[in-house]
């Protein structure tokens, strides 16, 4: 059987209208622009209001990606939504499918926190490689502001909302060059948005759990240490699988969590700062959206060009982390 390759042929993104800068945050909690900027590199973030939903942001990002890929919604076979903040715990991907009118597509949610987009890319690629699907829409979207404790200065300064999407397509040449995915559940307690059970007796002797999800809690120092150590390792492994030296990487595209983490990883890999894509300053940590959002901005600014090699890495709750090396295609292959 002929090998089927995978190419990423379009990207799109969407951000909420409202933004909140560090100065405004310092009116809510005991913090300062100086602390946030110097410790994280974040200046402002976008926040979804009640007129915006995960579905609306994701749909907007998807339409942009589909347009850039020069296909129609009816061409899509599969939609994967990477998110930890669905509008509906039963899943939001199908609603997006309905909004897009992607009548042929099957849709499902995938949850791997801030690693969701990288895990989603690898998942999407498997369906293409085995010949089942031709066109896959992958969305990374999160509205973490719904789950932030706005009185906790150690977390509320970090997060923002947004959505990004890409279209993957079967192609003769394979442009997804290598990947590595990892999880370590023994460190699960480092970063959580967890369900807190509360007993409710529905009839004598029968208790069910009717609790609520608790705001995001994080051991920032542990997550920082983990990221700086594990992300370079996983990128090196993915490069090894791709049979590429680090010098061949045109762009380093990390999950946008902290500028110090991005700088440390780039230093460790000896990748110069000119090759680092970052928009963290404007959006904060948008979880599963951060990589496709930064990718789309770089593509639309003409920074990332067809043929460029990108090393992308996501890391976060789970703990989960992963890297993928791909060559940006960005054009409809059948038109080449
Ligand atoms: O997407 C998931 C991945 N998540 C991450 O990658 C997050 C990784 N971790 C980090 O980015 C960093 O650990 C943080 C940015 C969260 C924190 O930076 P840090 O340099 O590790 O600060 P720290 O937690 O050690 O706190 C230093 C000080 C503490 O005060 P004391 O104990 O030294 O008096 C904190 O109470 O800074 C204080 N602090 C703040 N001060 C002003 C913590 N948050 C704030 C704040 N404003 N917002």
Image (cartoon, helix red, strand yellow):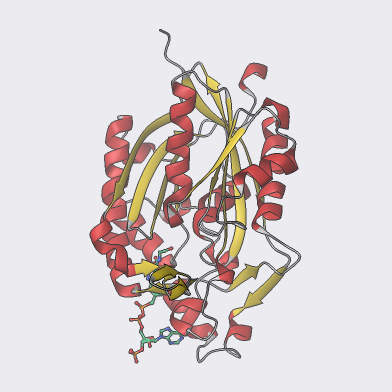
Q: Position of residue 216 (x, y in %)?
A: 45, 72
Name the residue at 27% across, 40% down.
237
Mark yes or no: residue 147 visible: yes
Q: Position of residue 234 (x, y in %)?
A: 29, 46
**Residue 179 figure quarter:** top left
Position of 320 relative to 161 (above/below):
above
Quadrant for the N terminus in the image: top left
Question: How many marks overall?
Answer: 0
Q: Write down which quadrant ligand 1 falls in.
A: bottom left
Mark yes or no: residue 175 visible: no
Position of 288 relative to 130 (above/below):
below
Q: Position of residue 302 (x, y in %)?
A: 63, 43
Position of 197 relative to 110 (above/below):
below
Position of 149 relative to 128 (above/below):
below
Q: Could you say which is closer to the camera, residue 41 or residue 59?
A: 59
Name the residue at 61% across, 21% down.
333
Q: Could you say which is closer to the camera, residue 22 or residue 145?
A: 145
**Residue 97 figure quarter:** top right
Quadrant for the C terminus in the image: top right
């Amino acid at each position: 059987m002929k090998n089927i390759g995978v190419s990423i042929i379009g990207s799109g993104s969407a951000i909420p209208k409202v933004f909140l800068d560090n100065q405004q945050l310092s009116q809510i909690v005991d913090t300062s622009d100086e602390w946030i900027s110097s410790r994280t590199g974040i200046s402002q973030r976008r926040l979804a209001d009640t007129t915006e939903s995960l579905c609306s942001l994701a749909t907007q990002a998807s339409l942009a990606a589909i347009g850039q890929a020069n296909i129609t919604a009816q061409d899509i076979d599969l939609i994967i939504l990477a998110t930890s903040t669905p509008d509906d715990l039963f899943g939001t991907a199908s609603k997006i499918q309905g909004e897009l009118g992607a009548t042929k597509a099957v849709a499902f949610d995938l949850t791997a926190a801030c690693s969701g987009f990288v895990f989603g890319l690898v998942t999407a690629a498997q369906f293409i490689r085995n010949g089942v699907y031709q066109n896959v829409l992958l969305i990374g979207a999160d509205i973490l502001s719904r789950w932030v404790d706005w009185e906790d200065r150690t977390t509320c300064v970090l997060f923002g909302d947004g959505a990004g999407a890409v279209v993957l397509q079967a192609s003769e040449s394979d442009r997804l060059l290598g990947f590595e995915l990892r999880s370590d559940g023994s460190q699960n307690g480092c970063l959580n948005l967890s369900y807190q059970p509360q007993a409710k007796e529905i009839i004598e002797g029968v208790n069910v759990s009717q609790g609520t999800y608790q705001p995001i809690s994080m051991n920032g120092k542990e997550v920082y240490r983990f990221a700086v150590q594990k992300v370079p390792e996983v990128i090196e492994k993915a490069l090894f699988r791709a049979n590429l030296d680090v010098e061949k990487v045109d762009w380093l595209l990390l999950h946008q969590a902290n500028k110090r983490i991005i700088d440390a990883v780039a230093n460790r890999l000896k990748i110069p700062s000119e090759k680092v894509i970052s928009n963290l300053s404007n959006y904060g940590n948008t979880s599963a959206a951060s990589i496709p959002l930064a990718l789309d901005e770089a593509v639309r600014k003409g920074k990332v060009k067809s043929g460029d090699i990108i090393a992308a890495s996501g890391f976060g709750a789970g703990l989960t982390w992963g890297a993928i090396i791909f060559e940006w295609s960005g054009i409809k292959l059948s038109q080449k």
